[in-house]
Amino acid sequence: MTKNAKFLARITALDFAEKKIFLCPASHIVSLTPYKEASLLGRVLEESFTSESLFGGSFRVTGSTCSGFLHKSHLEGDIASVKRVKVKELNYFEHYPVFTAIPKEIETIHSFNDISVGSLYEGTITSFTKTPL
């Protein structure tokens, strides 16, 4: 890609804390059908949860309204004590919400007006910035 080149890409992740939008211009990603539950993003769920240990410190957390992933890095305390989670992001490829159970994150309000994972964006490259992944 070059400066002033037009592009079409799908948002694959949002990082509100760092104010970053992650785009993927690959044709097989652009052609995917978006996750239908995008309205879950930012929603706080307060209910009883059950958990199943997965790999690498991850858990599948299931409540009465939805289930999703919770990684140990988004957990303060023991998994059994989780009663409140926030949908931090959506795993676009597996169509599961990713939760956080950290109270400070749950209370923080994030908003990138009208931007959601799975959306298609068309634009023009105006500059390049090298940042570490």
Image: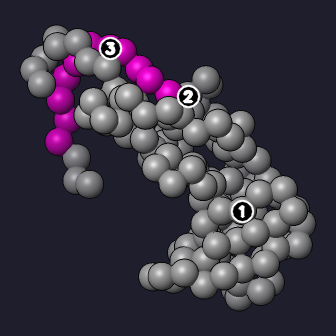
Residue 31 placed where, x, y %? 38, 28
Residue drawn 48% across and 82% down?
55
Who comes first in sequence, dot 2 or dot 3? 2
Q: Secondary structure at mark 3?
A: strand
Kindly identify the amino acid type of the residue bearing the numbered disc 2.
Ile
Q: CA distance from mark 3 to mark 1?
A: 34 Å
Counting residues from the start of the chain, the first of labels 1 and 2 encountered is 1
Q: Quadrant of residue 30?
A: top left
Picture coordinates of residue 133, whole percent (x, y): 26, 54
Residue 48 visible:
yes
Q: Nearer the viewer, residue 105 or 28?
A: 28
The circle drawn on residue 81 is none
Q: Left or right of 113: which side holds 44?
A: right
Residue marked by disc 3: 123
Which residue, given by chain and number where applicable, does mark 2 sit on?
A: 115
**What residue range appears in magenta?**
119-130
Which residue matches tag 1? 67
